[in-house]
Amino acid sequence: MLPPKLHHWFTARGWSPHRHQLELLALRDHPATLLVAPTGGGKTLAGFLPTLVDLANAPHDGMHTLYVSPLKALTADIKRNLQSPANDLGLDIRIEDRTGDTKPAARTRQRRDPPQILLTTPESLALLLSYEDAAHIFAGLNRVVVDEIHALAEGKRGDQLMLCLSRLQALRPDLRRVGLSATVDNPERLGVYLAPHPQPAHVVHADPGPPPDIRLLETAEPPPWAGAGGRYAVHHILDHIRQAQTTLVFINTRAQAELFFRALWDINVDQIPIGIHHGSLARDARAKVEAAMVAGALKAVVCTGSLDLGIDWGNVDLVIQVGAPKNIKRLVQRIGRANHRYNTPSRALLVPANRFEVIECRAALEAVFEKDLDRDPERNAPLDVLCQHILLTACSGPFEADALFAEVRTSGSYADLTQADFDACIDFCATGGYALRAYDRWQRLMLRDGRLSLRDPRSARGIRMNIGTIVEVETLSVRTRGRGASLGEIEEAFAATLTPGDSFLIGGQTVRYERLRDMTVEVSRQADRTPKIAVFSGLKMSTSLELSDRVTAMLSEPERWTTLPDHTRIWLTMQHRISKLPAAGRLLAETFLRAERAYLALYTFAGRNANQTLGLLITRRMEDAGLQPVGFVATDYALLVWGLVRVEDVSGLLDPEGLRNGLELWLAENAVMKRTFRASAVVAGLIERNMPGMRKSGRQATFSSDILYDTLRKYDPDHLMLRITRAEAARGLVDYGRIEAMLDRIRGRIDLVAAPHVTPLAAPLLLELGKVPIRGTAQDTALAEAAEALISEAGLAEVPHPSPQAGARKK
Amino acid sequence: MTSTTFSFCDILLTARPSGALWWAEAGILTVSDLHMGKSERMARGGGSLLPPYETQETLNRLNTEITDLNPSSVICLGDSFDDSAAAGRIDTASLRYLNAMMSGRRWIWIAGNHDPELPDIGGSHMEEVARGPLQFRHIAHPRADSGEVSGHYHPKAKVLTRAGYVSRPCFIHDQIRLILPAFGAYTGGLNCTASPLASLFSADAECILTGPTTTTIPLPSMADAAG
C-alpha cells in the first residue's frame, strides 16, 4: 500500500508508519477526511502522505497541495520537516511558505509560477483568492490540508477559511480536504465543518496514547483566599523546573505571567535559564525565546496562550498550569505539549492560585481522566465574515449573487444561511444597507449584466488592506527613552491610565512611564523598583460551561470532598453550616451586612464575562428599585453586589424579561457593546482597521467608531451591523447567552439565605480585584471636582514651552 | 444644560455645552467644523459606506441652538462641508432644512481648508470676517492680533477624575485667541496638548469642556497629559 520509495524512507529511519497515517493514505480520494490525533502522533506527515505519493508517482505542474495553519511560525517549521522526505524521495518540487512576512518578489513569483506545495495562513489564502488571477494560481490544486482545525473552528478565522475553501472548491471541484485536529469533544461535528456540505467527512482516530501523568500541587501552606498569581507556590515550582528537563509554565494572563516570571527570578539563586513568552512582547523578543527553546538553551519558559499552539519541542517533559485551567479541552492540549514522543505519558502539574481554584483544578483533573471535554458552544455563522467574503470575492472579479449564495452554503458553518440574510449582506456591501437610500450614485458594488462587481476597481486595495477577522485592541509600542529598543506593546486603554512616574512590568523588567510621544510609550528602566501596576490585558477567558457544572456538582456533594485538601474541606463545611451550598439546577443567593453596606452574592457559575454583564444589568435594576447599589465585582463563579439597602426580592431582579429589556435599552450604550460593534464593523468593512503609521497623521480627522454606533442606534436601529452586534453580544465579552442559559437552568429556583455575616464562600469575593463602581451621574460630579482641584492648582502647573513655529495642521 | 460665560477681549462670550459659541450682546452664534457630507465624500472615493446621517444629525444640533437663542447672525467657521463637492450634493431635504434656519438672519460661511469654495446655497461666503474686537477665520495665525476666533483643530481635552479618564471636545482660549471645538457629528478630535495646538497658547490658557454641562480647566501642560 505504501509505495516502495516511501516505505524505504520510513525503514531507513527505523520508523514504521502509524496506522492512522496509512488510513489517511487509503482515504486519499475521499472528499474530506478529519484526523484526530494527540500531539506527537505524526499528524502532519499523515496529512501530507497522499501528496508525497502523488508527487512521487508523477510530476505535477502548478500547485498540488495547499497547507493552511493558524500560525505563521508553523508554516516555516512544516516546510523544513517536509523538505527532508521530499529530498530523499528525489522529488523535483518546490515547497514554499507564504505569510505576511514573505518578500514582495517571492509573492509575485508565487502567483505567476505557484510551487507544488504552498504553506500559508487563512488570511494569506483569503488575499490570494481576492486576486483577479486566483483561477490561475490554483489551477492545478488537488488537495488542501488544514492544520490545528480544532483551534480555527472556535472562531471567525475558521469561518473565513471555510468560505475560502468553498471558493477553491468552485474553482477545483475535485479538491480533497484533510483536517488535522487535537482531541475534541465532538469530532463528527468538526468533520461536518470541514467537509463541503452536504458531503460527509471521514473521521480517522489515531491511538490516543497513554493517559497523562497529571497531578495537583499540594503545598503545606494553603493557597491564598483570592488572587490569581500563584506566587505562593513559586519555590515548589522552581524545584519542579530544576528536576525536569524542560518545562512550560502556562499562566492565564500576560500580567500574571510577568509577575510570576519576576517572582521566579527573585528566588532563582542558581540562575537557571528561564524565559518568558507572551503576546505583548516584541516580535524579536519572542523569536529569541523560541530559538533558545529549539536550541535547548532554556530550562523553562513562562508563557500564556501564545504557546498553546506551535512548534513541537520534543524536549519538553513537564507542563505546569498555574491558575485555574478554565477549559478542559485547552488543559488537555496544554498537557499534550509535554513530551511529544508518542507512547510516553505527558507529565503535568496543576497549581491552583486560590482556594476556589483548588476545587476547579480537582474538577478539571477528573474531567481529564474521564475524557469529558468541553462542548463547543453552538455558533451561528457570523454575517460580518460573510460581508468581508463578498467584498473580497468582488475584488477577484464580477460574480453572480445566486451562484455565490449556493457556494457559500456548501461551507459547513453557513449551510443553514437564509436567502434573506445573504441578501442583507449583499445589500450592505453594495449600498451600505441603510434605510435612507443615500448611495445610489456611489454604490460599492454595481450590478452589470446580472453580475455584481466593484464600482471603482481602485477600492480593491482598501478592501484587501482590511482582510482578516482578528480585530486587535489598539496597542501602543513601548520603548525606552531616546531611540531605545522596542520592549513590546500595551493596550491603548491601559496606556491612557498611566501618569508619569507609574511603573509597570514588561518583559520581566520594571519600567517607569515617562511620556507618550508619536504614539509610542516612552519608558525608562527601573531595575530596583517594585512595579506599581502590572495589568495590561483586558480580555479574560471565562470558565467553560462543563467545568462550571463539574465545580457545582463537586460543591453540592460533600461525600466527594474526600479528594480535596483539608483546608478546602473545612472551608466548605463551614459554608454548609452558616449558609447553603450551591446546587445544580438552583441558584444560591446570599445577603449579609458588613461595614454599613448591604451585600448580595449570586453564585451563578456563568463565567466572568456573563457575570460582569449581569452585574451591569442588575445594578441598573437595583437603582430603579431604590436599592442604591454602590459597586460590584464579578468572578467566574459569582457576582457580588453591594449597596445601601439589603435586597429581599432576588427573583424580581432576575426576571428574564426585565433583564432582556435592560440589555436592549441600557447595556446598548455600554462600552463593551461599543467594542463589540467596532470589531464586527471592522470585519464587515464598514470601518477600516487602523494601519500602522497612519494613526498618527490621521488622528484629528478620524473619529471614533462609537459615533457610528450611536448614529446607527438613533437613525437606523434595524441596520444589519446592529443586528450583528446584538448576535455577537450573546457570547464573547457580553456573553448574554450564558445568563439566559443560567436563568433557564434555575427556572426561578432561588435559595435565598439571609446570612448573619459574611459567608465562607463570599469572603474571597470581597478580596477580589477589579471592582466596578456604579457611576450614574458620578462621572460629571467627579469631573466638576477634578476641575475645581485643577483650577486651584493652576498657579503651580508646569507650563509647556511654546515652539517657535506653529504651522497649520492639514487634516 | 449649563453654559460657561467668559470674558475675551473685554466682551462676554458663552461657551455652549453643544460646542457652539454665543455672543449674546451682538446676537452672533458661531459654530465650527460641521463636516457635513463626510459620508458622501468617503463613498465617492470608493471607501466604506458610512451611515449617511451625519448631515441630518449636525443640522438637528444646529437647529436646537438656533431655536434656543434666535441669533441675528450665524457664522460657520469653515469646514462646514467635508469638501466643496459635498456641498453641491447636499440632499434637498437637508437643503430645505438649512434654508429654513437661514431665513430671517445673516449667515456667513467662512472658507475652510476642506471647503475653500462653496456653491451658492444661500448666505455669504467669506475668507475672514471682523465683528467688533473679534476676527473670525478658519485656521489660527501663529502671530495673530488679539481677538482671533477660529476652528480647524477640533480640540479635545482629557482629564483624570476619580471616575476614570473623561475625554471631551473643548474650547481653548487665552487673551489672544479662541479656538472652537468641532460641532459636526462625524468629527474626531486633537488632544489640546498636541504640539501644533498647545504651542498657540500662553501659559494661562483655559479649556472649556463640552458635554452635558461645560467644565473649565486650565490647559493641561504636556507633562500632565497621558495621551
Image (spheres, helix red, strand yellow):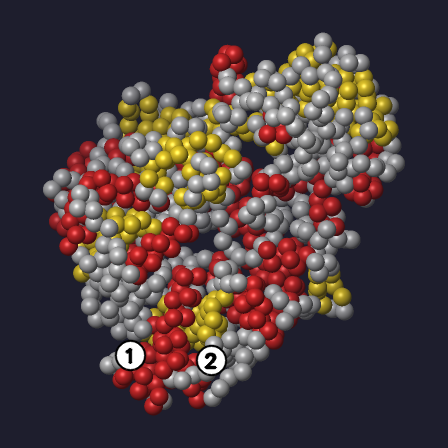
> Residue A502, position in %: x, y?
39, 30
Residue A263, horizontal then vertical, whole percent = 24, 40
Q: Which mark is residue A76?
A: none
Read off the chain for label 2.
Answer: A
Q: Chain of mark 1?
A: A
Residue A423 location (% of width, % of height): 65, 60
Q: Secondary structure at mark 1?
A: loop
Q: Which label is found at residue A18?
A: 1
Tags 2 and 1 touching, CB below 8 Å: no
Q: Residues within 10 Å of mark 2 (few under 14, many from 20)?
A: many
Residue found 77% across the figure and 20% down from its top: B135
Residue A103, compared with residue A802, is above or below; it is below
Q: Nearer the viewer, residue A550 or A184?
A: A184
C-alpha gap between disc 2 and disc 1: 25 Å
**Quick check: can you spot residue A174?**
yes
**Along the line of sight, the residue nearer the viewer: A423 or A600:** A423
Residue depicted at 16% across the width and 36% down the height: A574
Q: Position of residue A412 (x, y in %)?
A: 49, 67
Residue at 45% of width from left, 57% of height from top? A155
Instruction: Give the answer, above or below, for where B208 lies relative to A121.
Output: above
Q: Is residue A809 above or below residue A269?
A: above
Q: Residue at x 58, y 78 (%)?
A: A139
Query: Residue A417's quadrant in the figure?
Result: bottom right
Q: Quadrant of the C terminus of chain A?
A: top right
User: Between A302 and A703, which is closer to the camera in this rendering?
Assistant: A302
Q: Mark 1: which amino acid? A: His
Instruction: Give, as a three-letter code, the residue at label 2.
Output: Ile
Q: Is residue A184 left or right of residue B207?
A: left
Which residue is the site of mark 2? A93
